[in-house]
Amino acid sequence: MSNFIDLFFNLDIMGQAWPLLFKGLIITLKLCAVVIGLGVVGGLLLALGALSPRRWLKWPAVGFIDLFRALPPLVLLIFVYSGLPFAGLDLSPFMAVVIAFFLNNSAYFAEVFRAGIQSVPKGQTEAARATGLGAAQTLIQVVLPQAVRNVLPDLLSNTVEVVKLTSLASVVSLSELLYSANMARSVTYNSSPLVLAALIYLAILWPLVRLISRYQRGIAVH
Amino acid sequence: MRFLDTFFDGVVMAKYLPDLLLAIVTTLWLSAIIVIGGLALGLALACLRTLGRWYLTLPIVAFADIGRAMPPLVVILIFYFGLPGLGISLSGPMVLILVLGGVLAAFAEEIFWAGLTAVPKGQWEAGRATGLSFAQTLFDVALPQAIRLGIPPLVNRALAITKMTALGSVIGVKEILAVSSSAQSFSGSATPLTMAALAYLAIFLPVVILSRLAERRYAWSV
Amino acid sequence: MIEINKLEKCFGDTQVLTSIDLRVNRGELVFVIGPSGSGKSTMLRCCNRLEEPTSGSILLDGEHVTDCRGRALDRMRLKIGMVFQGFHLYPHKSVLANVMLAQVKALKRSRSEAEARAMEMLDHVGLAHKASAMPSELSGGQQQRVAIARALALDPKVMLFDEPTSALDPELVGSVLKVMKQLRDEGMTMVVVSHEMNFAREAADRVVFMDGGVVVEVGTPEEIFGNPKSERLRAFLSRLQPSGA
């Protein structure tokens, strides 16, 4: 038992590793902000494309969404990070991560937004257009607020997935939270930094996960 | 032309194709075990939770929450690098199966449970009133309805988690990404990465498209 | 006021409207009756282009509704108020915000002006005291009166009613009809698709009978209900009798 605590919950080592992990955490949070922001915007545009009656908009959007939902994000990341330099495109790890996860995430957000927009009854759009609102005004004022409310649990759970996803950036040596923790592990020959990182992820994401469960229960009851 | 040589080099493709085929087989059997094991465990946990005993519910909810909130790569690294210190040495594939199977079980438990709570109380009462036992009502009345409700999110989640078998490349599992990554560094060509992407598309794109069609079917039948 | 010329509408291979000609004069209440599937609602929805006519033209005060595109169509729709069977109030906005939205966004009125106008219209339909309520807190009849206020606040030249009372419980129908009667007395031009035959007898200037996508008969309520000329209209009216309508 003492061996277990020493290896996984060694407070001394956790204390030593904390400054490094904290720096990593900041990078993780920055990464999350950029990837979530881009993913939401891209996803919304893709969803609008996929729902468009115009074929030349609809099929490319659907194709994009399906393509990037089928590719594992790590494969996408390695492809962008190690593959694109062959095409003369040298990217910093941060940029590579942002591009790869944008492609992955906007596809996932697009599916959520599409479901949300489809959940708003057609009469809402008709009522808005009948009062002279334009297509964009109808979308922003009438459809999107209802769509977002209807798929809020899915939007939240997608956001949780993005935060978890950023841990993959460690594979391309971006010094985010997990990379820093693994660094500390290999220096100290002790897993406590990894456990500390796990606890930090848990502290950020557990409240969100609870909230999602609460929402799903709420929907189930109604 | 340079682009074709870099990403679609025929010689490189021929050379690494046998290795890649073996890797595809590895990815497939890992995926199969993870999906079957994860779904079975998730279903079992959801059923246990219906008993309503706090000493069962509490650990199940804790497991489901942690499994959903924790980035899988963190847990994989802890298992792979940490456990040997306790005298428990697990192979790479074993770690991958335990962690990803566990993550899928956590999500599946929540989905099955949400489905079970969505089954109207009257269904349980009707089952019990016609002389069925608790277990018979659960398995013959409630669960079939819960599973039907849960199919779309389960398919999406199982897909997302089987794609994570690519994380095996970090702990030396010879799956598609690992094999093509090492081939890329040996050959100095980006072609193996293209092959990996194509291999993943061949496996997962049909699932994505099928789930899209199934969703449409499902939407009609409601 | 409204001029419908040779209006045709097809959904795929099925023709739902065939060569509809209809004129609605200023201040007139025209009532459209007919069996379900006769194309009444489709004709109404063509008038503000929620359905795209296959051919033919519709004019409002001499201006082509059917040629408008983009912003011009939005501006045209401001002049044509529409009330739906399903109310379609925006569930995420308060009653007041429902009535203000298009005034601010489409008519570009200032917020204070829009609010004053909204309160005036809500008062008109007897619901000023519900201004801060959410639509879900209102009865169906109240929701429909808010929907009428929402359309009226834009100062339309004509109001279209698409089965405005069909989704209401019988005891709530009266309050909506009362508002419509009041509108008529104030001189609003109205086209009403509805099954409320008593209301048609009482309030309509003219009644249009449609069946199978064509206008079969047009006349005063006395002519249509008292002296139906065509066999189809007689059959339609006799089917209504037992229900006491």
Image: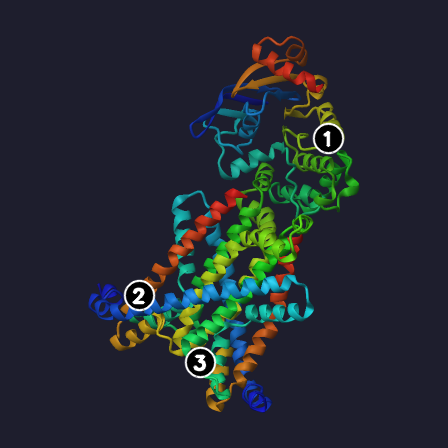
- Residue C129 location, quadrant: top right
Dot 2 and dot 3 within a common chain? yes
- Residue underneath mark 2: B194
Work out which residue is located at the far left of the displayed protein and give it.
B11
- Residue underneath mark 3: B90
Across and down, in percent, residue C206 comes to 64, 16
- Residue C203 location, quadrant: top right
Across and down, in percent, residue C180 comes to 71, 27
Q: CA distance from mark 3 to mark 1?
A: 74 Å
Task: For residue A17, say whether it is visible.
Answer: yes
B186, C133: nearer the viewer: B186
Q: Under tag 3, what secondary structure?
A: loop
Which subunit holds the residue at mark 1?
Answer: C
Depth check, mark 3 against mark 1: the one in front is 3
A127, C76: nearer the viewer: A127
Dot 2 and dot 1 within a common chain? no
Q: CA distance from mark 2 to mark 1?
A: 66 Å
- Residue underneath mark 1: C176
**What amino acid is labelled 2 in the image?**
Thr
Determine which of the numbered discs, if any, sits on residue C123 in the image.
Answer: none
Task: For residue A160, say whether it is visible.
Answer: no
Compared with A187, B205 (above or below) is: above
Compared with C163, A65 (above or below) is: below
**What amino acid is labelled 1 in the image?**
Val
Depth check, mark 2 against mark 1: the one in front is 2
